[in-house]
Amino acid sequence: MKRYIIKYSLLLIAVCFSSATFAQKDVRKNIRKGNKEYMQQKYSEAYTFYENAITENPSAPEANYNLGSTSYRQKNWEEAAQLYQNFLAIENENPEKMSSAWHNIGNTMLQQKDLQNSMEAYKMALRLNPEDEEARYNLAVVQKLIQDQEQEEQEQEQEQDQQQDENQQEQQDNPDQPKKTEQSTEPEQMSRDNARQLLQAIEQDEKETLEKINKMKAEERKEKAEENRRLNKDW
């Protein structure tokens, strides 16, 4: 009876070990396929393979990281940040890879205009890898953006305070002066010639504006391509 129990236990262990090995091979297979699709910029297909790998093994660090990078490429900033966080919860031995994840979290926050959290993420990246010059550059850019934003807000507050002081002073100097009445919003009648001239002017403005917008979009696409090349770090 004891021999039967021992044999059954050994068989069960062997089956469990074989299943785990097979599952691990399946994870690696999906990651390799995902990497191949990712390199070809087929991000939707890569996403599916990485997701399959995580389904087999939620604690697979490379799958979580690469899925985060794929989400980033698809401009799913929030999901990308969460996946990088998942990676950081798994990986705690490789400072360079952890720094890279924090760097990319900083990128996702920057894309969402979350400057404060972006700054903190870049700081974390540099604490783990002080040699990361790209993170140092991006941190400097974000700090400058925050400084400009704070300065602009301060100037706006000063302008509002100054305008309020001027209004109060004017009211004190002229206490009997009646308040200005709002101008009528009734449209004035105009001749057909005037209307035609105005319409032509508007059409011309729209044409020039459209040209400017197209030019700005082309420049923006060029800048984004350069930014993606510089900012995004892949596994």
Image (tube, helix red, strand yellow):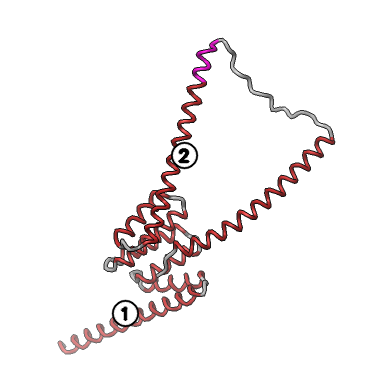
Discs 1/2, front: 2
Q: Which residue is drawn at 45% across and 43% down?
A: 149
Q: Residue at x 29, y 81 (%)?
A: 16
Q: Main secondary structure of the magenta part?
A: helix
The amino acid marked with disc number 2 is Glu
| Label 2 element class | helix
Q: How many marks?
A: 2
The amino acid marked with disc number 1 is Ala
Q: Residue at x 65, y 55 (%)?
A: 214
Q: Is residue 129 left or right of residue 167?
A: left
Task: Decide whether residue 121 is among the magenta residues.
Answer: no
Q: What stretch is highlighted in magenta?
A: 167-175
User: In this orientation, which residue lies closer to the viewer: 182 or 154?
Assistant: 154
Q: Where is residue 92 in the image (x, y as percent from the top left)?
A: 27, 66
Q: Position of residue 227 (x, y in %)?
A: 49, 60
Q: Position of residue 123 (x, y in %)?
A: 33, 55
Q: Residue at x 54, y 12 (%)?
A: 174
The residue that label 2 is drawn on is 152
Query: What whole-number distance in Å separates the C-alpha atoms at marks 1 and 2?
Result: 58 Å
| Label 1 element class | helix
Mark 1 or mark 2: name the one nearer the start of the chain. Answer: 1
102 to 33, vertically: above or below: above
Task: Decide whether residue 169 is among the magenta residues.
Answer: yes
25 to 215, vertically: above or below: below
Numbered circle sitting on residue 20: 1
